[in-house]
Amino acid sequence: MAGRSAEVLLGLGFAGIMTTLFLGFQWAPSVAIDAFESPAAQRIFYWHVPAAWAAFIAFAVLFTGSAMWFFKRSPLGWRLHVAGAEAGLACGLIAVWSGCVWGAAEWGTPWDWTDVRLNTFGLLTLLALFLVLGRQSQPDGVESRDTFSTFGLFGFVLVPFTYIATRIWEIRHPGPVVGAGDDGGSLSGDMAIVLFIGALSFTIFIIGHILISMRITSLEQRLEQALHHIDGGK
Amino acid sequence: MDGMTYLTVAYLGMIAGIAIWTWTVVNRSRTIEARLTAVESSMGIIASEADSISKEHKD
């Protein structure tokens, strides 16, 4: 039942994501042709920003799960940790990929080592990659879980740092376009609506993914115990 | 490359990423569920006691 709910959320989120793509191409207005080096490529933004938003949600789940495991030895916490790392990696890679392509079109380079937001977000994605690959390559045990949870706890420091980076150092990344303060940002109304639909859709989509990942971890634990019984353990 | 080419490359990459990620997760879930159902049905294991590591190290 829970598995079916997660799959329904995945389906709803995916439908919303595709709707965002359609609206971004067909309905949202074009940017002023002299405002960007590559005005057409600006439409990457309708998935790039929501994917980065979803990655932040995943990293918050990772942080919560890491804390619950580390301080409470909570099985739910460990499942949240695993699901947060996997979802953070997927959404992080989507945001980094689309950002690199946009950077190549707009800045003339896919990566700028001096841009703080770019690099802290890249580090967060690498952290998620380390946690996903590390868990797959290490035997499951309390020591390995503690180690990975510690990385999940301290790595979260990069999230607020990434969020405020363009407010302090606006190097390559544009400054805030929504929630920017009194002027309300630089987005037109129609662009903001498409962006909001995208953010909502990616949020639903990632919740579905997190629920399924938690279920997979639970099933893996049950399967491991069953195999342990078959091997003669207790 | 012009802007539309960059746009196409970016979205094709993202669509492929989302598709691979979703297919992998859903497929893993269904495969492991089928394996587990077959094994557990003959052993009587209780699901809530499955995470032996957290059970052993709970304060």
Image: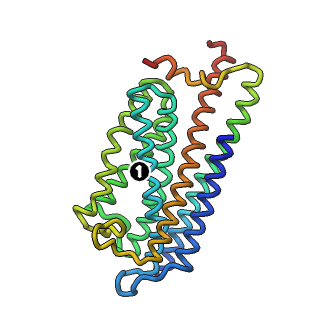
Q: In the displayed structure, does residue A86 sit left or right of residue A160?
A: right
Q: On the rendered image, what quadrant is the C terminus of chain A found in?
A: top right
Chain name for mark 1 = A
The image shows residue A8 at horizontal and vertical percentages of: 66, 52
Q: Which residue is under mark 1?
A: A125
Q: In the displayed structure, does residue A126 sit left or right of residue A232?
A: left
Label 1 CA crowd tier, 10 Å (few <14, some 14–19, many 20+): many
Is A57 placed above or below A47 here? Answer: above
Is B27 placed above or below B15 here? Answer: above
Q: Amino acid at mark 1?
A: Thr
Q: Residue at x 66, y 42 (%)?
A: A3
What is the image's colouring? rainbow
The image shows residue A67 at horizontal and vertical percentages of: 39, 34
Furthest-left residue in this view: A168
Q: In the displayed structure, does residue B8 sit left or right of residue A177?
A: right
The image shows residue A163 at horizontal and vertical percentages of: 32, 56
Q: On the rendered image, what quadrant is the N terminus of chain A found in?
A: top right
